[in-house]
């Protein structure tokens, strides 16, 4: 944010830019998860691509080495996002939104890791974990917003409402492994 302020962006403009960048991240996270990570399988090649991109994570949800994006995927994505922001916003206005996007990405990675490897203690944390585990173990065509579950309400991918205790044994095993 200090870079944004140094480019003659006032504090309010910087804060709004960071917030806008964060909101852009949440929409990218949702649609990336929904359209790319859950790519429709139409043959053996697309099945392999889908498995490598995200299927391996669904098959092994307690594998802590597959819970965050590897740096080899993160850095190119950051460069592309920076270039798009720079081209659309200009040199002086790119920093706040890019910082917000990057902050959103880090929040997503941390939340996703914690949902699988940690043990949320707050009511909100337990709710988000349950929603994500329902996506993993019951309804993979719903609940795509990992760190932004409100977008599942916006895009009508909330899934069915389930009572407590209706997760599969696999989800319980994942929960136990995280404890």
Image (cartoon, rainbow, N blue to C red):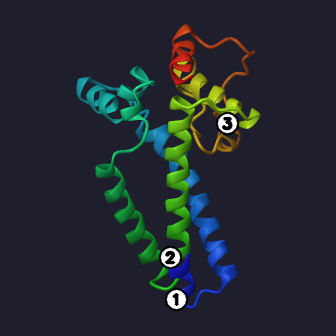
Q: Earlier in the sequence, mark 1 or mark 3?
A: 1
Residue 101 lies, with reference to residue 50, above or below; the image says below
How far is disc 2 from disc 1 in space, using C-alphas? 9 Å
Q: Earlier in the sequence, mark 2 or mark 1?
A: 1
Residue ID for mark 1 = 7
Residue 16 lies, with reference to residue 145, above or below; the image says below
Question: Image point 58% across, 24% down: which residue?
Answer: 133
Q: Earlier in the sequence, mark 2 or mark 3?
A: 2
How far is disc 1 from disc 3 in space, using C-alphas? 40 Å
Where residue 82 appears, x then y in whole percent?
A: 41, 69
Question: Image point 49% across, 45% down: which residue?
Answer: 109
Question: Image point 60% across, 86% down: which residue?
Answer: 9
Where residue 177 appears, x then y in whole percent?
A: 50, 19
- The residue carrying pointer 2 sits among few (fewer than 14), some (14 to 19) or many (20 or more) residues within 10 Å by Cα, namely many
User: As rendered, which of 85 and 133 lies closer to the eye?
Assistant: 133
Tell me the element at label 3: loop
How far is disc 2 from disc 3 in space, using C-alphas? 32 Å
Labels 2 & 1 near each other (Cβ < 8 A): yes
In this rendering, the label closer to the viewer, 2 or 3: 2
Question: Image point 70% across, 80% down: which residue?
Answer: 12
- The residue carrying pointer 3 sits among few (fewer than 14), some (14 to 19) or many (20 or more) residues within 10 Å by Cα, namely few
Q: Is residue 98 left or right of residue 47?
A: right
Residue ID for mark 3 = 156
Q: Quadrant of the N terminus?
A: bottom right
The mark found on residue 95 in the picture is 2
Which residue is most to the front?
A: 179
User: As rendered, which of 159 and 17 lies closer to the eye?
Assistant: 17
């Amino acid at each position: 944010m200090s870079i944004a302020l140094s480019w003659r962006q006032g504090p309010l403009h910087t804060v709004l830019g960071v917030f806008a960048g964060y909101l852009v991240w949440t929409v990218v996270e949702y649609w990336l998860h929904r359209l790319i990570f859950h790519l429709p399988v139409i043959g053996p090649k697309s099945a392999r691509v889908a498995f490598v991109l995200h299927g391996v994570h669904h098959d092994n949800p307690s594998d802590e080495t597959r819970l965050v994006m590897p740096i080899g995927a993160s850095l190119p994505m950051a460069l592309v996002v920076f270039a798009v922001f720079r081209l659309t916003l200009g040199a002086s206005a790119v920093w706040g939104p890019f910082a917000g996007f990057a902050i959103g990405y880090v929040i997503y990675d941390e939340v996703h890791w914690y949902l699988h490897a940690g043990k949320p203690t707050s009511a909100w944390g337990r709710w988000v974990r349950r929603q994500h585990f329902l996506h993993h173990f019951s309804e993979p065509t719903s609940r795509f917003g990992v760190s932004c579950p409100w977008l599942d309400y916006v895009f009508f991918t909330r899934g069915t409402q389930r009572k407590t205790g209706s997760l599969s044994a696999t989800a319980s095993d994942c929960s136990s492994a995280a404890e």
